[in-house]
Image (spheres, rainbow, N blue to C red):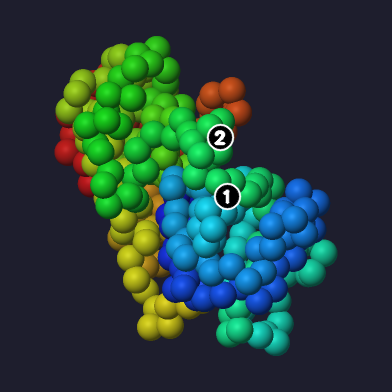
Amino acid sequence: MPEGDTIFRAARTLHRALAGKMIVSFASALPKLERVEVDACVTGRTLERIAANGKWILMDFSGDLILLTHMLMSGSWHIYRPGEKWKKHPAHMRIHIATNDMEAVAFNVQIAEFHTQESLLRRRNYAQLGPSVLAETFDEAEALRRLQSDPMMEIGTALLTQSKLAGIGNVFKSEICFACGVHPFRRVGELSILELAALVSTAKKFLLQNVAEDTPDHIVTYAGMRRTTGRMDRQENLWVYQRRGEPCRRCGHSIESRKQGLDARSTFWCPQCQPLERSLRQPV
């Protein structure tokens, strides 16, 4: 599933390619979106702003019309110049937005809805989002308060709960816990305020590192790799995620994993570096 860093980069690229331009063509394979084009004409409006909030992308069109999308497990947004060959089969197209010089295509998008400002505030799940880790106004104190509100929840599950802080996915969950020396199956109520604060600040640090500019051409479909170790080698870019049975990069102990939470997401950790009892080790 795309995580907050992927969504942030996608929204940033879409904004650079489309913001301030008039829509010359809008099409969708989703009947509810196509109905809005018929009834309210997306074509002819100006796409004023594209932004990310956690794992959601919002496209603000003139006339109080907002396209809200969520990628879930397999969705993605691509940017193309007119006539450029798509990287995915047209059968996977769900939304196509064109200006005179750019095209945005959403492939396999699972959630896509038009809203007004008023209806967006009532949209379940979206309206309940916690502070977005990548927002310029990210409120760490509020994120801490929300984490502490469920003391019996395992911290690995809490970090994935978007109503507590928005943008963290399964990869970052394991990587953040490792970096802070926190066992992901410890309960929130067992963690000290220092440990919780370290988790929140490390979440912000890791996600910000993964949205840094890394190409001279800013209007591209991102295809880079996620890193938390700071190493450029693709074989060494993560601390623990998907490394079950491999040696810990810090202590050499074998990495472990098991399913966690109602969604049974795989969680990875080092039992030596992340003991079940409290650890005050400084985050990496």
Near-viewer residue (92 or 24)? 24
- Disc 2 residue type? Arg
Is residue 247 depicted above or below 190 in this figure?
A: below
| Residue plotted at (47% across, 61% down) | 50
Q: Is residue 143 visible?
A: yes
Type of the residue with mark 1: Leu
Q: Nearer the viewer, residue 269 or 115?
A: 115
The label on residue 68 is 1
Number of numbered labels in the structure image: 2
Locate residue 134 relative to residue 128 in the image: left or right: left
Q: CA distance from mark 1 to mark 2?
A: 10 Å
143 is higher (above) or lower (below) than 69: above
Q: In x, y percent, where is residue 11? A: 48, 61
Residue named by callout 2: 123
How crowded is the residue under tag 2: few (<14 C-alpha within 10 Å), some, or many (20+)?
few
Say which of 267 and 126 sits in front. 126
